[in-house]
């Protein structure tokens, strides 16, 4: 683990948000790195100082009463509505029980999912985490996913177009297994995460930035795609356009 990678995870370590494996990696790095160990001490001192300062503010009870009075009055749900909700919940549970990787993105989910794909991208940059199958041959990478996912992700060789296929791996987003196709643009890594979706509706590409990384996301053919990298947004857009073009032309493995 490098200092840059450890520094990103220090706050999560202090707040107890890392799993045992990542916490151990950060702690092992800190044990041999005076710079990161000093940073960790500084962050802990700041956290303790804020907690000791008792800077929290409790709103007065009168404010609570005014807010509650301004809210629209709601009626208790009818028996029919309760049964309808129960039936819907049962249907969702049945779909989940099939094990299908069917991520349905609602507006309130999108930020969380994007945060998770960025975290998966960061994990992949640690030594030995980038690929499970290392190959520049799309006909080697795609078959590797068979049997590991319900739907193997499409693999496109874009090496001749400036984006070198490196390999692929299994990752996890929203607690479900997901395929990741790995490319390089010069010294930069591009992770293309692919997951099955319950909808076949095509969603146009959109590029956003999170934690210093650019994310290009789109949906088509019953699949969600998230391309994540630290390359410039226009280059990531170019990557996505070339991938989509190759996919439509039937060049995918």
Image (spheres, grey):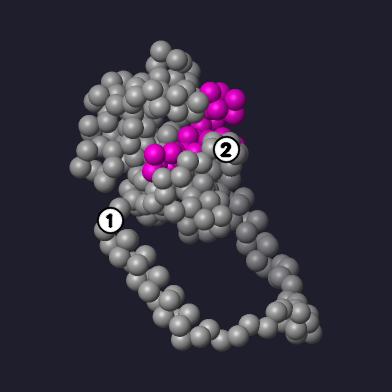
Residue 33 location in percent, x, y? Answer: 49, 39
Residue 42 location in percent, x, y? Answer: 62, 50
Q: Residues within 10 Å of mark 1 (few under 14, many from 20)?
A: few
Residue 73 location in percent, x, y? Answer: 68, 83
From the image, tell me which residue sits under label 2: 206
From the image, tell me which residue sits under label 1: 99
Between 172 and 153, the one nearer to me in the picture: 153
Q: Is residue 70 visible?
A: yes
> Taking 68 as reference, is 19 left or right?
left
- Residue at 48% across / 80% down in the picture? 81
Q: Secondary structure at mark 2?
A: strand
- Residue at 31% across / 41% down in the picture? 170
Which residues are the magenta region?
212-238
- Whether the magenta-drawn stretch holds residue 170 is answered as no
Up/down of 185 relative to 12, above or below: above
Label 1 close to label 2 by CB (< 8 Å): no
How far apart are labels 1 and 2 at the CA level?
28 Å
- Whether the magenta-drawn stretch holds residue 226 is answered as yes
- Residue at 22% across / 38% down in the picture? 146
> Taking 75 as reference, is 167 left or right?
left
């Amino acid at each position: 683990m490098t200092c840059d990678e450890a520094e990103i995870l220090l706050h999560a370590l202090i707040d107890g948000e890392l799993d045992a494996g990542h916490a151990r990696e950060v702690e092992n790095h800190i044990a041999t790195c005076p710079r990161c160990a000093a940073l960790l001490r500084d962050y802990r001192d700041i956290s303790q100082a804020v907690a000791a300062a008792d800077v929290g503010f409790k709103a007065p009870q009168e404010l609570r009463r005014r807010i509650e009075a301004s809210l629209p009055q709601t009626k208790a749900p009818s028996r029919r509505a309760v049964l309808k909700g129960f039936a819907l919940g049962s249907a969702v549970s049945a779909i989940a029980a099939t094990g299908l990787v069917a991520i349905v993105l609602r507006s309130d989910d999108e930020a969380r999912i994007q945060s998770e794909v960025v975290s998966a991208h960061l994990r992949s940059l640690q030594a030995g985490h980038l690929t499970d199958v290392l190959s520049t041959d799309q006909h080697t990478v795609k078959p590797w996913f068979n049997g590991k996912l319900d739907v193997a992700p499409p693999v496109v060789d874009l090496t001749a177009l400036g984006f070198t296929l490196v390999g692929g791996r299994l990752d996890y987003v929203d607690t479900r297994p997901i395929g990741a196709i790995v490319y390089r643009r010069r010294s930069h890594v591009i992770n293309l995460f692919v997951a099955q979706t319950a909808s076949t509706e095509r969603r146009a590409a959109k590029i956003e930035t999170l934690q210093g990384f650019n994310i290009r996301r789109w949906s088509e053919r019953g699949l969600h795609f998230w391309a994540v990298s630290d390359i410039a947004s226009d280059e990531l857009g170019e990557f996505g356009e070339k991938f989509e073009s190759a996919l439509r032309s039937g060049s995918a493995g």
